[in-house]
Image: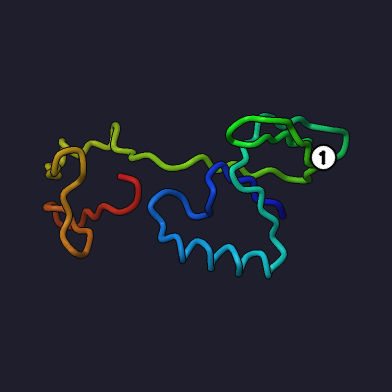
Amino acid sequence: VTVVEFLSSIGGLGIDAEVSKQFMTVLKKQGLNFKMSTKVTGVERTGDGLMVTTEAAAGGSSEVLDADVVLVCVGRREFRDNLGLEAVGVELDGRKVKVNGRYQTNVPNIYAIGDI
């Protein structure tokens, strides 16, 4: 398994640098390979697999990887559109859903967690 990561560390923005470093060490011991600060510029189907083209995130020469499967993950963003929060009376705190320490909104039995 090869992980191609645009950032210079795994785990995304905001993750503790030491946690990221230790996690990557554990994953490497399990046999994962990492290409950090690298972007995928294309994926093409070949006769029996896939051809993944990458290059340094800052630009540069390209490299081709052969793959059986490609899994793409491209970050997160909040998702609130068309959920009907206003219709059921869920209170907002600016652009965020207002919750208590248990992620419960002001409406009984409605909880808000994740990218909302």
Mark 1, residue position: 49
Camera-side residue: 33 or 70? 33
Q: Quick check: 88 left or right of 53?
A: left
Left or right of 55 in this view: 75: left
Query: Which percent across, then down, holds residue 1?
Result: 72, 55
In the image, is residue 2 above or below residue 37? Answer: below
- Residue 28's spot in the image, x, y percent? 66, 64
- Which quadrant is home to the C terminus? top left
Residue drawn at x 46%, y 65% is 18
Is 20 located above or below residue 58 in the figure? below
- Which residue: 13% across, 52% down? 107
Disc 1 residue crowd, few under 14, some 14–19, many 20+, Cα 10 Å: few
How many marks on residues? 1
- Name the residue at the right extreme: 47
Q: Position of residue 58 (x, y in %)?
A: 58, 33
Q: Residue 33: where, in percent of width, then height?
A: 70, 56
Residue at x 78%, y 35% (from the top left corner): 51
Identity, as a three-letter code, of the amino acid under mark 1: Gly
User: Which colour scheme appears in the figure?
Assistant: rainbow
> In the picture shown, does residue 11 fall above or below 41?
below
Horizontally, residue 41 falls left or right of residue 84, namely right
Q: Secondary structure at mark 1?
A: loop
Which residue shows up at 59% across the image and 43% down it?
37
Image quadrant in which you'd find residue 60 = top right
Using the rendered view, name the quadrant where residue 99 is placed: bottom left
